Image: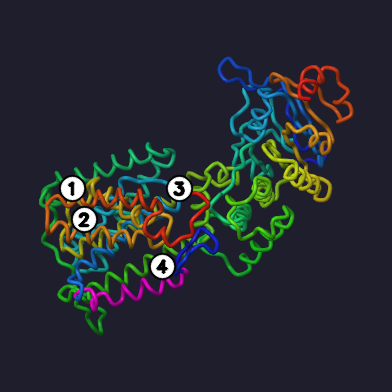
């Protein structure tokens, strides 16, 4: 890992499903500590692009680099170990387990304990401390003993983010973190993401439809349309971009 | 050992209370069962079927993967024990060890072919392997006794040097021997479920995709859980052969696989002790109803349908708090 390399780099990445070009020639460079938002109309290829980055499937063309290292052929599980934490458009949690147990499974996996039949007292303490830490970060300490499936939508999302954090990622990928939430929950989750970015210095890439969230959080914004990169810039630049207004922002309002 | 519950603060009867009640009942069986018109050998059968179903339940209830071929490992355990006693040595512990290893290792190897299958495909392949084992035992007359089953062996007394335990002649003593083995086995299961590895089984059941994106090698964990599950069911099979002094090719048949699944589901596959409760119900029906009519499977099937319709979480599931979906 080189300090000079960007955290994440996509070089002319493309993905075809049969004759459908879901993503074509997208290049993107995300710096260390940056919060990048990816926006675009439905079907623009945002989630496909995420799946390429996280190794859900390999790209048809182009290269993906993490910390300057080409990871095209690295399987998803390995990318997690290299520091990629991901949440999904539809919250992926362990619904019938408590918040604490959800986080514990993530912590134990991150620490490499997942095949162990027992833990020493020291290791147990190490796990418990790490669980408490991520739950504090995600503001879920009060809910620790509740079943995740019984939490509000916003808190379920927070639990999912806590599980991603438990793996001590260096890059967080959040697919529509506020999808389907009301104002109050959106506000809570947005606050959590901002804390992670500002206070804990995570590099974050997120897909988002809610423009208030995007313009509020992002350092830079990439706009995808029909699988191509339409524009990229600061929130100010993007809001003034004529192409973007025509393709997307104008219609959204 | 304790009951493993996946929900915080969720049981009506606390886990330690369940533990006390269950063990108090199991330890006193020879005293109260005859008063109800039962006999001790039937209690042994309950323990054996419960252990087989608890072994399966590690896979079905805790990892969320359905095997419809666990009779293969149950039967291999039984034949392994019987063949050892008949051809190798008159040692009960050796018979148990050999049968458990035979069934467990067969399951472990076969599991390698299985782990990429899911759902109904997984279940279908497990049935196929079970039927292969059934036909081998069925056709190989000279070695396995074929259709008639393997006879000509008896369980040997336990020889501790200083003293002997006559589990061969004394039925009550044999019951306590089976209970002892059962206790060790379910204790091990509880330890496994409470371990970090055990929690990854739950994780896979709850959400395989999330488990994968935590970086868990899901296939490897399913394989290990299948393997462990087969060892326990094979152990139950060895006890079955010792109980009857007989290994039956029907013990390898898919009907037996179905019975094991039915016991786990009726009792409550999301609970630790569910399969034991299911085994009590199943063996009772099998014993009492089959003494009245040869169509006893009709009544077992009807009971199964009723239990599943009325108590989707199984009989032990009734002790758990409602809510939070299934």
Q: Is residue B15 magenta?
A: yes
In the rendered image, which quarter is residue A147 located in? bottom right
Local crowd size for mark 4, using a 10 Å CA cut-off: few (<14), some (14–19), many (≥20): some
Labels 4 and 2 share a subunit: yes
The answer to the question of whether label 1 and label 2 lie on touching residues, with beta carbons closer than 8 A, is yes
The answer to the question of whether label 1 and label 3 lie on touching residues, with beta carbons closer than 8 A, is no
Give the CA distance from mark 2 to mark 3: 26 Å
User: For the stretch drawn in magenta, what is the main secondary structure?
Assistant: helix
Which residue shows up at 19% across the image and 44% down it?
A: B136
Mark whose residue sits in front, 4 or 1:
4
Instruction: Report which residue position mark 1 lands on.
Output: B137
Q: Is residue B293 magenta?
A: no
Instruction: Report which residue position mark 4 lands on.
Output: B187
In the rendered image, which quarter is residue A80 located in? top right
Looking at the picture, how far across and down is residue A45, in whole percent? Answer: 67, 24
Instruction: Report which residue position mark 2 lands on.
Output: B79
């Amino acid at each position: 890992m080189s300090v000079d390399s960007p955290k994440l780099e996509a070089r002319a990445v493309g993905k075809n499903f049969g004759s459908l070009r879901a993503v074509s020639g997208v290049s993107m460079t995300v710096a260390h500590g940056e919060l990048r938002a990816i926006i675009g109309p439905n079907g623009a290829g945002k989630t496909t692009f995420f799946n390429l980055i996280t190794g859900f499937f390999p790209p048809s063309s182009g290269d993906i680099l993490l910390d300057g290292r080409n990871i095209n052929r690295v399987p998803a599980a390995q990318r997690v170990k290299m520091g990629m934490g991901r949440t999904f458009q539809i919250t992926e949690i362990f619904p019938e387990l408590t918040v604490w147990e959800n986080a514990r499974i993530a912590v134990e996996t991150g620490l490499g304990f997942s095949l162990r039949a027992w833990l020493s007292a020291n290791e147990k303490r190490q796990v418990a401390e790490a669980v408490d830490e991520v739950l504090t970060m995600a503001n879920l300490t009060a809910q620790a003993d509740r079943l995740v499936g019984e939490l509000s939508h916003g808190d379920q999302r927070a639990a999912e983010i806590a599980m991603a954090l438990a793996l001590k990622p260096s890059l967080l990928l959040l697919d529509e973190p506020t999808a389907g939430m009301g104002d109050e929950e959106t506000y809570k989750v947005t606050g959590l993401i901002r804390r992670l970015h500002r206070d804990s210095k995570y590099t974050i890439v997120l897909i988002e439809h809610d423009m208030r969230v995007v313009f509020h959080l992002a350092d830079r914004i990439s706009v995808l349309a029909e699988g191509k990169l339409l524009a990229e810039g600061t929130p100010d630049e993007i809001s003034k971009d004529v192409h973007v207004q025509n393709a997307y922002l104008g219609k959204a309002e | 050992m304790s009951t493993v519950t996946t929900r915080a603060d969720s049981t009506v009867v606390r886990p330690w209370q369940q533990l006390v009640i269950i063990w108090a009942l199991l330890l006193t069986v020879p005293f109260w069962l005859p008063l109800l018109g039962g006999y001790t050998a039937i209690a042994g059968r309950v323990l054996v079927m419960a252990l087989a179903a608890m072994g399966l339940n590690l896979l079905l209830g805790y990892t969320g993967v359905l095997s419809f071929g666990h009779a293969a490992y149950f039967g291999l355990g039984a034949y392994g024990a019987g063949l050892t006693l008949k051809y190798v040595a008159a040692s009960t512990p050796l018979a148990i060890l050999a049968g458990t290893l035979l069934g467990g290792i067969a399951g472990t190897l076969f599991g390698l072919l299985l782990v990429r299958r899911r759902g109904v495909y997984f279940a279908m392949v497990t049935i196929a392997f079970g039927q292969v084992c059934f036909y081998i035992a069925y056709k190989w007359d000279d070695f396995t006794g074929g259709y008639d089953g393997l006879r000509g062996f008896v369980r040997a007394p336990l020889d501790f040097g200083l003293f002997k335990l006559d589990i061969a002649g004394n039925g009550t003593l044999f019951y306590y021997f089976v209970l002892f083995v059962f206790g060790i086995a379910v204790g091990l299961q509880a330890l496994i479920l409470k371990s970090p590895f055990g929690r990854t089984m739950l994780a896979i059941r709850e959400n395989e995709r999330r488990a994968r994106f935590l970086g868990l090698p899901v296939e490897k964990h399913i394989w290990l859980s299948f393997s462990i599950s087969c060892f326990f069911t094979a152990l139950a099979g060895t006890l079955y052969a010792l109980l009857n002094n007989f290994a039956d090719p029907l013990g390898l048949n898919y009907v037996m696989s179905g019975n094991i699944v039915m016991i786990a589901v009726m009792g409550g596959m999301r609970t630790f002790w569910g399969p034991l409760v299911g085994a009590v119900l199943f063996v009772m029906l099998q014993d009492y109803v089959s003494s009245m009519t040869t169509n006893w499977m009709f009544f077992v099937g009807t009971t199964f349908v009723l239990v599943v319709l009325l108590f989707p979480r199984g009989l032990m599931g009734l002790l758990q708090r409602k809510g939070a979906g299934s």
